[in-house]
């Protein structure tokens, strides 16, 4: 075997390993969504009606945990972040697509996957069809949108630490503390 074949085999092994890690973490994520109760239609609709804050509590917990974990792994040199630029146009289009799907079906993409895992027929029929149709429509429209509305209000790949020229931990630690305080407040008010 020559050196190119060995390198190619290493790349294949790395890709397979990464896919298996992704599958494993996806299954774990779906399990945790289920255990958190956010794969249930009633819980999601309760969030939309502002009478059940389970979804907010689960998502804020995930943001806080993920934020600390990602920046810890980055500071240890285990990962490198690849930021994707954004724009107001991208956020508006994404929010509209996400919001319409969320309001019509009562699931977001993550909770659809968890609800499909639970065998919920509405998620299997409506959710999976909605994801596939929405993805297809966006893919068809993308060439027309990419240089138009998706570029409006371009703000690049800026982060709060870069914007304020601060060490990442000077932003991460207070943001984490604020999220934890918010979670305690939500829990103490009975939401």
Image (cartoon, grey):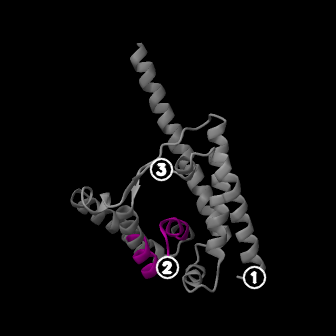
| Labels 3 and 2 touching (C-beta < 8 A) | no
Q: CA distance from mark 3 to mark 2?
A: 32 Å
Q: Is residue 108 magenta?
A: yes
Of all residues shown, which one is farthest toward the left? 144
Of all residues shown, which one is farthest toward the front? 164
Q: Residues within 10 Å of mark 3 (few under 14, many from 20)?
A: few
Q: Mark on residue 106? A: 2
Dot placed on the residue nearer the N-terminal end, 1 or 3: 3
Q: Which residue is mark 3?
A: 158
Task: Give the camera-side residue of 142 and 122.
Answer: 142
Q: Mark on residue 174? A: none
Q: Residues within 10 Å of mark 1 (few under 14, many from 20)?
A: few
Of all residues shown, which one is farthest toward the top? 2
Horizontally, residue 186 falls left or right of residue 105, namely right
The residue lying at 54 percent from left, 48 percent from top is: 22
Q: Which residue is mark 1?
A: 189
Task: Choose mark 1 or mark 2, whichever is in front.
Answer: 1
Secondary element under disc 2, as helix, strand or loop, is loop
> Is 128 located above or below residue 8 in the figure?
below
Residue 42 drawn at (x, y percent): 58, 83
Dot placed on the residue nearer the N-terminal end, 1 or 2: 2
Q: CA distance from mark 1 to mark 2?
A: 25 Å
Q: Is residue 44 magenta?
A: no
Q: Start and end of the magenta stretch?
A: 97-115
Residue 100 drawn at (x, y percent): 40, 77
Q: Quadrant of the N terminus?
A: top left
Prevalent SS, magenta region: helix
Task: Give the camera-side residue of 84 and 78.
Answer: 84
Hey, which quadrant is residue 54 in on the image? Answer: bottom right
Q: Answer yes or no: is residue 188 visible.
A: yes
The residue lying at 44 percent from left, 49 percent from top is: 157
Task: Choose mark 3 or mark 2, whichever is in front.
Answer: 3
């Amino acid at each position: 075997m020559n050196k190119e074949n060995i390198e190619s085999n290493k790349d294949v092994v790395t890709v397979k390993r990464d896919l298996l890690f992704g599958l494993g973490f996806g299954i774990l994520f779906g399990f945790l969504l289920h255990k958190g109760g956010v794969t249930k239609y009633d819980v999601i609709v309760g969030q939309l009606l502002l009478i059940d804050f389970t979804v907010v509590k689960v998502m804020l917990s995930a943001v806080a945990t993920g934020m600390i974990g990602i920046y810890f792994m980055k500071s240890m040199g285990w990962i490198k972040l690849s930021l994707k630029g954004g724009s107001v146009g991208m956020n508006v289009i994404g929010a509209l697509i996400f919001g319409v799907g969320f309001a019509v079906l009562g699931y977001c993409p993550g909770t659809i996957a968890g609800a499909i895992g639970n065998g919920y027929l509405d998620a299997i029929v409506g959710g999976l069809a909605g994801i596939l149709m929405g993805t297809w429509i966006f893919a068809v429209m993308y060439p027309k949108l990419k240089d138009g509305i998706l570029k409006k209000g371009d703000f690049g790949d800026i982060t709060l630490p870069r914007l304020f020229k601060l060490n990442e931990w000077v932003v991460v630690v207070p943001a984490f503390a604020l999220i934890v305080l918010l979670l305690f407040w939500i829990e103490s008010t009975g939401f």
